[in-house]
Image (spheres, rainbow, N blue to C red):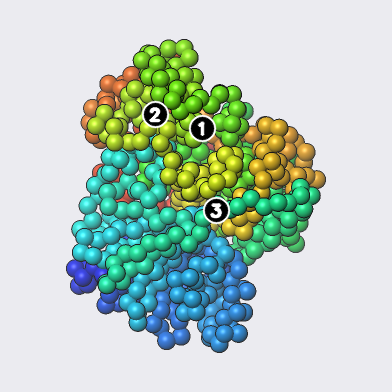
Amino acid sequence: MCGIAGFAGIQRYTPDAGALLRRMCDAIRHRGPDDAGYFVGSAACIGMRRLSIIDVAGGHQPMANEDETVRVVFNGEIYNFRDLRQRLRVAGHRLATSSDTETIVHFYEERGEDVVHELRGMFAFAIWDEKRERLLLARDRLGIKPLYVWPHPSGGLAFASELRSFLTLPDFAATIDPDAVAAYTAFGYIPHPASIFRGVRKLAPGHRLTWTREAGIVESEYWSPARPERAIEEREAVAELRRLIDESVRIHLESDVPLGAFLSGGIDSSAVVASMRRQMDSRPLTFSIGFREAAFDESPYAAEVANALDTNHTALIVDPDADSLVDDVVHAFDEPMGDSSALPTYLVSCLARRDVTVVLSGDGGDEGFGGYTRYIETLSGVPQLPSLLRGSVRALASALPLVAPGRNWLLNLARSQRGRYASTVTAPVRASEGGVMRDEIAERHPTIDHILEDVFNKAGARDFTTQLMVVDLLSYLPGDILTKVDRMSMAPSLEARVPLLDHVVIEFAVSLPSSLKMRDGVGKWLLRKAIEGTVPDTVLTRPKQGFGVPLGRWFRRELSHRIDQLLSPSSAIYEFYDPARVRGIVSEHRAHRRDHSGTIWRLMLLDLWLRALGRGTIARAVEPRDFLAEYLDRATS
């Protein structure tokens, strides 16, 4: 695992190119505390910070081909690298290391930009081809690893694993994009290709980009999760899924450093750990975090699974100083992120990092196998009106007061089926819908019925249930879940791997008929069948529980003064939000008239992030902090 950064074709950087490259990489040293490497050329500079996982001694980057005309910097892991190395030897390549990185540069020699099709894993890489004076950037199929691109006004471009690298460049204007703030308000994250900074975009999952002086920037998609439905019997599908999960977990176990797993006791993490146990000679190290409030504590379920599978389990029940912890979380994100489950993800990452450098996680099971309850909610309960009637119902609902009984039901009735789903994953932006954005910004943002429309169109002609899963794979998964896991694990320099998001597993999952994923109101039907008998029965029968935090209590106690700070007229958020509307939702929340905790959390995180940006904190690497040691010291004093 690493962080990468660099630039190409920016002539004005030439006199200070080496120093600028080092500053870009130093800003992400938390992603790679073990090593650093740089290449400074006449037309391009590429660099990296390395967290050494495979070939610890020999995997130094940038890595070059035999005649040093092609160089690569790489963030991620290539799980089929042993097979690739053998093929390269047969083709006559001389391999100087035992690393997976070297396979990328040599297969680029063989296949050019189609090298991406050879790679099975998580990756973001940059290849500089000296002969062609061409830069190739690529991001893995599901967007597990991040990659940002800043097209430079002079015609070149800069790239980085995190936005904080751009903040070190002398002519980078960190101008906040109001449209990105509106998207953040709606989703709780900023969907690709946008970023919080105007002019910077995320390279989309499954995309590659080339830059040359002649052609400039050319971007293309090389993979999509959308797949036609296959005809398959349930028994055959169960056997194939078991095989694919075991194969994926096996290749994800490749590591030259200590490895473990996150274990919540839910279906996904239990499936991964059960497969690890079957394939490892030693007891897997597993880790879980619990809160003292029972409603947010999954640790008993994790302990039950750990005991049944005989893992070496470490659990910590915490009542953390949320006020102190939130600043660490804000700093670890290079752009605002409103998912409150980032806090327990950060805590369990810190816990695991004490013993291991790599963890396997169960993320991806919900998106691939139909696990979210919102799928069922969208597909049932409200009749689908003809499009001609929806406008009239919407007008009727909009004329009612925001707190009028039945107003939300009417609004939902007025939406298309796609719009209903969008309403389950977004918060309102417009004042007429209960949002708090300034009108001039909100009016540019799509209505809920149109949010995700482009993503739905990419989902193909499959049944609506499968479309919902593909939409999540293309949007919520990379924008929220994988961003959260990447930044929260990288903050303590921990590599998180996601076997259920191996693209071979996902291609199989998406191709299945929806009846094998959701049946009789139960999600993950096939995944449940595939792990039946390998995990405790309670894992399969217990209702789904999210990885949440006690926001209600925190807002009443530890974080109450943060809300007061949010209401200060000096807050930078009021460039984007209407102060009276913000005061209104805070007043309603504090009076227990309506629960606005999700919206208040997003506003508070944005406020804190903008303050950190103003102080220059976001431009600096995340400093190591043993939060758990501090917590244990307080608990025992």
Q: Could you say where residue 277 lies in the image, as x and y percent from the top left? A: 73, 55
Above or below: residue 77 compared with residue 108: above
Report the side of 255 relative to 434 (left or right). right
Query: Of the residues under marks 1 and 3, which one precedes in the sequence?
Result: 3
Q: Amino acid at mark 2?
A: Pro
Mark 1, residues whose alpha carbon is within 10 Å: few (<14), some, or many (≥20)?
some
Q: Is residue 58 visible?
A: no
Q: Amino acid at mark 1?
A: Gln
Q: Nearer the viewer, residue 622 or 519?
A: 519
Report the side of 100 relative to 396 (left or right). right
Front: mark 1 or 3: 1
Q: Nearer the viewer, residue 567 or 125?
A: 125
Return the mark for residue 428.
2
The residue wearing badge 1 is 417
Q: Could you say where residue 401 lies in the image, as x and y percent from the top left? A: 37, 13
State the CA–CA distance, disc 2 to disc 1. Answer: 17 Å
Which residue lies at the image location 73% right of the left edge and 38% below the top edge?
540
Mark 3 element type: loop
State the CA–CA distance, disc 1 to disc 3. Answer: 21 Å
- Whether label 2 touches label 1, CB < 8 Å: no
The residue wearing badge 3 is 225
Query: Of the residues under marks 2 and 1, which one precedes in the sequence?
Result: 1
Q: Is residue 361 visible?
A: yes
